[in-house]
Image: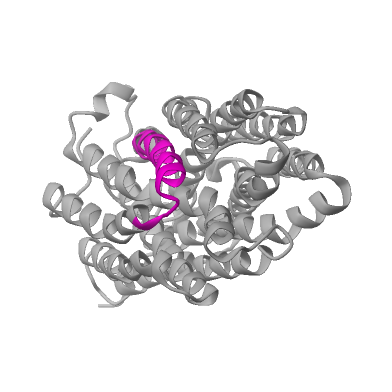
Amino acid sequence: MPDASPQPTGSYRWTICALLFFATTVNYVDRAVLGVLEPELRTAIGWTGTQYGSINAAFNVAYAIGSLGAGWMMDTLGVRLGFAISLIVWSLSAASHAFARNVTQFALARIALGIGESGNFPASIKTVADWFPKKERAFATGIFNAGSNMGAILAPAIVPALALYWGWQSAFVATGIAGIIWVFFWWPIYRHPENHPRVSPAELAYIRSDPQEKIEKLRWRDLFPFRQTWAFSIAKLLTDPVWWFYLFWFSPFMKDNFNVDIKSIGLPMVTVYAMATVGSIFGGWLSSKLLERGWSTNAARKTTMLICAISVTPVALAPRVDHLWIAVALVGLAAAAHQAFSANLYTLASDIFPRKAIGSVVGIGTFAGAMCSAVLQIIIGTLKDSTGGYNAIFIFAGSAYLLALLIFHLMVPRLEPVDV
């Protein structure tokens, strides 16, 4: 019999996806600026590795706590208002770094930034679930998640020039302004698909082509009894800290191991995150393609994640190689695999939970990942000051994804929608 399911029609949902991509780009530019400037600020402010780790930990704790509230806010207020509030808060916080003059002031600015930025992923994942059928969600997630790589590319491409010509303060101000500009596009453009004048009836039918969900009011605490919530959170707890490590410590690692300064850090960082961009989109495309070929959701998502987890393992050798570009290639491959893994992990939340709960579930998982990241940031700074090396953290980075996937599979052997 011919396939009676709705076929792809209309394209306005991809305009919404583009807005998510640009928001995530701004998000990562804002959080990456400090890592790019660390060698410069190490001299200007005079912090130690332990103090720098503590500044990053302050951001992670604020991001973790904010994620719990952000998920609830997106589910309660809706993403149109909730996302706008998030962008305004983090943009003003990013600009406030320009006025910091010591470790405490930088930590306070990072706390405010973490609270604001925590809204990005709960809002984006919820928006994808609202605007895309399940067969397209991994690909759409991979596209908007590629904004994190684009942000990490733009930061080393732009920030050194701003710092060298107008001082390091200008980099924070410029990135803060970018977020405010985004809000002026988001507010007039975004509406729920059912209420959007640019969405045709045919495209809306395609967006809603999955079996209708039984949507009820959910309490945040109602999600904790489900093993799926814990499985998602544990996977985030193990893998998110690795990404934060690359974001905050790649520039110091290059400085310490290969004497790469602010004038020459741009190309290595751009290379790493350009590779990560390809990985993010590829990971979403691969699992979506496997679904099109008749694979089950369980097999398509987990097979893609297994490929990614194996691809990460060589990064353990990065601090042991002698050539700069071999280290860059190893970190770049790991960053690409992380983003592909992450795109599918986020999509698992929308595969399992109803749209009403996605923002909260992602917020809970992000809380777990950010809290573990806070602890790891302090450990990294302490190890850096005591041993001068990065061997232990790269070993952890190389093994975390296989462990995360194993635990997730043992806890959730089959991907089935939860009955909430």
Report the number of discs.
0
Q: Quadrant of residue 55?
A: top right
Residue 114: x and y in percent read 55, 32
Specify whether residue 171 is painted magenta. Answer: no
37 horizontally vs 207: left or right: right
Above or below 248: residue 102:
above
Q: Nearer the viewer, residue 258 or 270?
A: 258
Q: Main secondary structure of the magenta part?
A: helix
275 horizontally vs 104: left or right: left
Specify whether residue 387 is painted magenta. Answer: yes
Residue 375: x and y in percent read 37, 35
Q: Which residue is depicted at the point 70% across and 47% down?
A: 40
Q: Nearer the viewer, residue 321 or 398?
A: 321
Q: Which residue is depicted at the point 61% across and 35% down?
A: 47
Q: Nearer the viewer, residue 242 or 221?
A: 242
Residue 162: x and y in percent read 81, 51
| Quadrant holding the C terminus | top left
Q: Quadrant of residue 149?
A: bottom right
Q: Which residues are magenta?
A: 366-391
Residue 284 at least partly seen:
no
Residue 358: x and y in percent read 37, 39
248 horizontally vs 293: left or right: right
Residue 291 at least partly seen:
yes
Q: Which residue is depicted at the point 54% across and 28% down?
A: 115
